[in-house]
Image: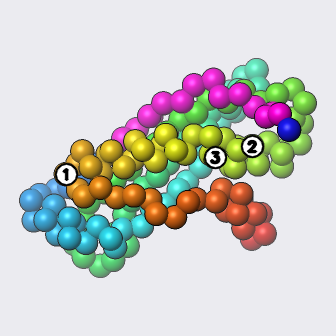
Amino acid sequence: MSEKFKIITEFVKDLSSETPDIETYLYVKDYLKNYNLNIDITSLPLKNRLIEVNTKLSFTDKGNSKKKSNFEITYATIVKIEEEVKDKKEMEKIILCEVQNKIFPNLEKIFENLLKDSGYPIIKIEKKIDFEKLYNQQRSN
């Protein structure tokens, strides 16, 4: 099966690591395991069957502590959808699954480097993200 899209370009659109002070840094360093990774995918139609896909990863502590750091990246991918794709559901699946499966290894590496370069222990995203499963869960809600 041939792909029904082509990635034209991909780039870091926004990158943020916020730690307000040394006390917070020391606290977060010990409790980074309490942080959760969230993914938000949005798209913006451009012209000539081009779509801007923004994949936003945020790594946050949902707990009650006042000492928190915030880590976030928005990764933009410009995708050209083939002429044969007419169905909206097929286009959604391309954006939410197929494009994500292609770009995520690079995005994951950039995000892990953001944490490391911010002075935190190396965090590996342990669970492989199953974009197909997430897509199917979203559709069933």
In this figure, which residue is indicated by the disc labeled 3?
101
Query: What amino acid is labelled 1 in the image?
Result: Gly
Residue 115 image point, x, y percent: 30, 51
First along the sequence among labels 2 and 1: 2
Determine the secondary structure under disc 1: loop
Query: What amino acid is labelled 2 in the image?
Result: Ile
In this figure, which residue is indicated by the disc labeled 1?
119
- Asked if the residues shown at circle 3 and circle 2 are in contact, with their CB atoms under 8 angstroms apart, the answer is no
In this figure, which residue is indicated by the disc labeled 2?
94
Q: Which mark is residue 108?
A: none
Q: Tell me, yes or no, whether the highlighted magenta stretch contains residue 15.
A: yes
Q: Residue at x 82, y 28 (%)?
A: 82
In the image, which is nearer the foreground, mark 2 or mark 1? 1
Dividing the picture into quarters, in which one does residue 102 lie?
top right
In the image, which is nearer the foreground, mark 3 or mark 2? 3
Query: What amino acid is labelled 3 in the image?
Result: Asn
> Image check: 103 left or right of 131?
left
Q: Main secondary structure of the magenta part?
A: strand
Task: Tell me the crowding category of disc 2: few under 14, some 14 to 19, or many 20 or more residues within 10 angstroms, Cα based.
Answer: some
First along the sequence among labels 3 and 2: 2
Residue 99 image point, x, y percent: 66, 41
Q: Residue at x 71, y 57 (%)?
A: 132
Q: Which residues are magenta?
A: 2-16
Query: 101 or 140: nearer the eye?
Result: 101
Identify whether 51 is placed above or below 96: above
First along the sequence among labels 3 and 1: 3
Q: Residue at x 33, y 45 (%)?
A: 113
Determine the secondary structure under disc 2: helix
Residue 73 visible, this orientation: no
